[in-house]
Amino acid sequence: MADIEIRAVRKSYGKNPILHGIDLAFASGEFVVILGPSGCGKSTLLRMIAGLEEITGGEIAINRRVVNRLEPRERGCAMVFQNYALYPHMTVAGNIGYALKVAGVPKAERLRRIEETAKIVGLFDYLDRKPAALSGGQRQRVAMARAIIREPSVFLFDEPLSNLDAKLRVTMRAEIRKLHQRLSATSVFVTHDQVEAMTLADKLVVMNKGVVEQVGQPLDIYHRPASIFVASFIGAPAMNLFDADIDLDGACLAFAGAKLLIDRALAAQLGAGTVTVGIRPEQCIVAPDAKGGVAMKVDFVEELGSGRVIHLELNGHPFAACVDEQTRVRPGDWISLVMPLAQLHVFDQKTGRRIEVDLDPRAVRGPAGQPALVTV
Ligand SMILES: Nc1ncnc2c1ncn2[C@@H]1O[C@H](COP(=O)(O)OP(=O)(O)OP(=O)(O)O)[C@@H](O)[C@H]1O
Ligand SMILES: [Mg+2]
């Protein structure tokens, strides 16, 4: 077990700054997921923890010991890579036990530990096979076993599931989580898949363009995204986001030719100007007729089996709403979209950061009696 501290860490390649001052603290035994779009610097950060990449500025400490100058093997980390990096000429047993062989562990003990580790990942019957004769998921497990056998205090995973098919990804995700519970080493897992991130993380770190946008528990981030970037990156289908002008006199948000009524207290809190407003498709309510909510035209419908996503249009602006199987609509239909006020996210348009607002419980009422955005 180990805790990790990352203090003001920067990275440049030549003159190109890649990471712009990262501050993070991971507790011992925590499962941390680093999520962000391609190129934002996730792998670079992970490789700096592992010692595979030089640190340009700042400090990384593992168990309160600064590791900036330590060799990778002195850091107590084991890394699992996206492409598994197995030795093709060695058997599964050879691959799993390679680090122990290099470390000079006697053969009998080595074999015992190889068998024990192979059992943990369900590969005991495959010890004599070569990697070429394994499925993608089995190869992935060899890579995991190779990390586990070293009994590291920190596991570092760089998109280990991205080469697997959708079904296997889900299975392996559950296995990695179970394994973590069993071994309770600190795990840092990098991915650009937000579902993977939400389901695996105790602590989620959302990165964008070399900076940390938000750190927190997955559900907290889902419910209170700190920025427009996080709001749009977390959640599927993506949050509806629109720029709205605040009309203080009428207590309205003007958006796409529609005027949406908000309560006076909320308008006063926001002040005059333009804000970015967001609401998740799963929080919108689709009413059958155009009374009460905001009238929108159905563009197309996506069937998900368990429900459907309705893609809507308001004067050329796209909107999405999730509905259950019972709600039947067709392209071209007009529906009324109710956006409960309590579910609105408001962001500063210039900084992109969240604005905390206090909603008056006596605010404007939608058709079902709940405070909601309705057209004036
Ligand atoms: N050795 C290198 N030399 C120069 N630039 C590099 C090097 N390695 C990475 N970069 C650049 O650093 C940035 C961050 O790369 P990194 O691999 O950390 O991204 P990532 O978040 O892991 O992306 P992905 O999800 O695609 O794996 C990218 O713009 C990349 O081009
Ligand atoms: Mg990467």
Image (tube, helix red, strand yellow):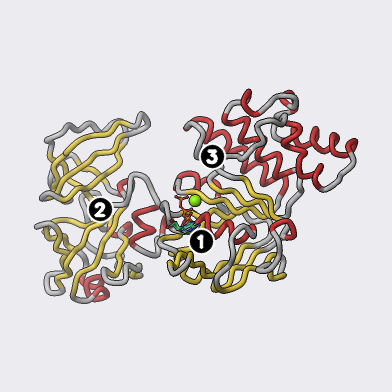
- Mark 2 / mark 1, whichever is N-terminal: 1
Please, what is the three-letter code of the amino acid marked with disc 1? Gly
Q: Residue at x 69, y 70 (%)?
A: 66
Please, what is the three-letter code of the amino acid marked with disc 3? Leu
Tell me, yes or no, whether the two marked residues, 2 and 1, touch with CB atoms within 8 Å: no
**Left or right of 301, for residue 190:** right
Query: In the image, is residue 369 above or below residue 237?
Result: below
**Left or right of 329, for residue 157:** right
Query: In the image, is residue 317 above or below residue 211?
Result: above
Determine whether the beta carbon of the residue marked 2 sits less than 8 angstroms from the nearest atom of ligand 1: no
Mark in front: 3 vs 2: 3
- Mark 1 / mark 3, whichever is N-terminal: 3
The label shown at residue 254 is none
Alpha carbon separation for disc pair 2 and 1: 26 Å
Task: Please state the horizontal and vertical placement of residue 199, each as a whole percent of the image.
Answer: 52, 45
Task: Please state the horizontal and vertical placement of residue 338, each as a whole percent of the image.
Answer: 22, 50
Mark in front: 1 vs 3: 3
Alpha carbon separation for disc pair 1 and 3: 23 Å
Q: Which residue is mark 2?
A: 339
Q: Which residue is mark 3?
A: 161
